[in-house]
Amino acid sequence: MNNRGPRHVVITGASAGIGQALARAYAAPGVTLGLVARDAARLAACAEQCRQSGAMVETAQLDVRDAAGMSAWLMAFDDAHPIDLLIANAGVASTLATTGDWEDLERTRRVFDTNFYGAMHTLLPVIDRLRGRKRGQIAIVSSLAALRGMAISPAYCASKSAIKAYGESVRPLLARDGVRLSLVFPGFVKTSMSDVFPGEKPMLWSADKAARHIRAKLAAGRAEIKFPGLLAFGMGLLPLLPAKLGDAILGRLSYVPREDR
């Protein structure tokens, strides 16, 4: 990377939400974006917006669960445009609408395959190349939900906690090779994912505000990016409380499935 910031940026989940906002935030003359998403129409629309801002854009209609497809595309992109910044952002949510709802094995696997293994399919093909070049930056989007499990979204919380643990584990290893890794922990951001969340959504940020914040903190080299600050503080305190008290607080905030009627 140079003093102007990263020139070659890859973002997964770029067709909507935070990923789309990040693509727009990084789009500028002299920047080449590699945008990955499943929805071809929305991906094309995002790419066009970025081109209008002066960026060169390459797109891939890919599901991050496709390990071979992700690896092949990432290697080809990196051959042409050595990656400076890789943002593993793609993810899905799962919430329990009522007490009669339950996440079976199939549903749980889908969440983990996208959120955790999708992140691995994004990172692992590129890590050795970044280490070999002794430079570069990786950002993995987790969630404030990683800080404390919630009854309303067990698989989602677990998948984001797995990302947190993995990122914390490999960060010092990558740092020895000159590669920076940042973990991003968003709170509630106005996206289609948050729109279907049945609980309270305090301190809701717009996707553009979240993207600007993430970009600024990545530029500053922050190892952890948690926002909004007050909600992050509260979620960080919950694991320090007795478990029953933490459960009760989350219940009062409607972060448990509602009773069937």
Image (tube, grey):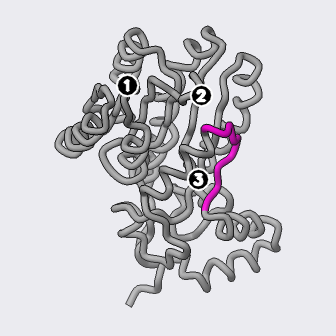
Residue 223 visible, this angle: yes
- Circle 3: is it few (<14), some (14-19), or many (20+) Cα within 10 Å? many
Picture residue at 56% right of the left edge, 56% below the top = 186
Q: Residue, x 75% and y 78% (percent of image)?
A: 244
Q: Which one is nearer the viewer's eye here, 2 or 15? A: 2
In this picture, is 180 found above or below 97? above
Q: Residue furthest bottom?
A: 261
**Amino acid on which disc 1 is placed:** Thr
Secondary structure beneath label 1: strand
Position of residue 244 relative to residue 85, above or below, is: below
Instruction: Give amino acid for label 3.
Output: Ala
Residue 247 image point, x, y percent = 68, 76
Relative to 156, say whether 8 is above or below.
Answer: above
Percent x, y for residue 43? 25, 40
Which percent across, then down, holds residue 71?
A: 41, 19
> Quick one: 93 or 176, which is closer to the camera?
176
Is 30 a magenta residue?
A: no
C-beta proximity under 8 Å, tags 3 and 2:
no
Q: Which residue bears the numbered disc 1? A: 32
Task: Give SS at disc 2.
Answer: strand
Q: Is residue 246 left or right of residue 108?
A: right
Please report the bounds of the magenta region as a residue range: 219-227
Q: Mark 3 — residue? A: 158
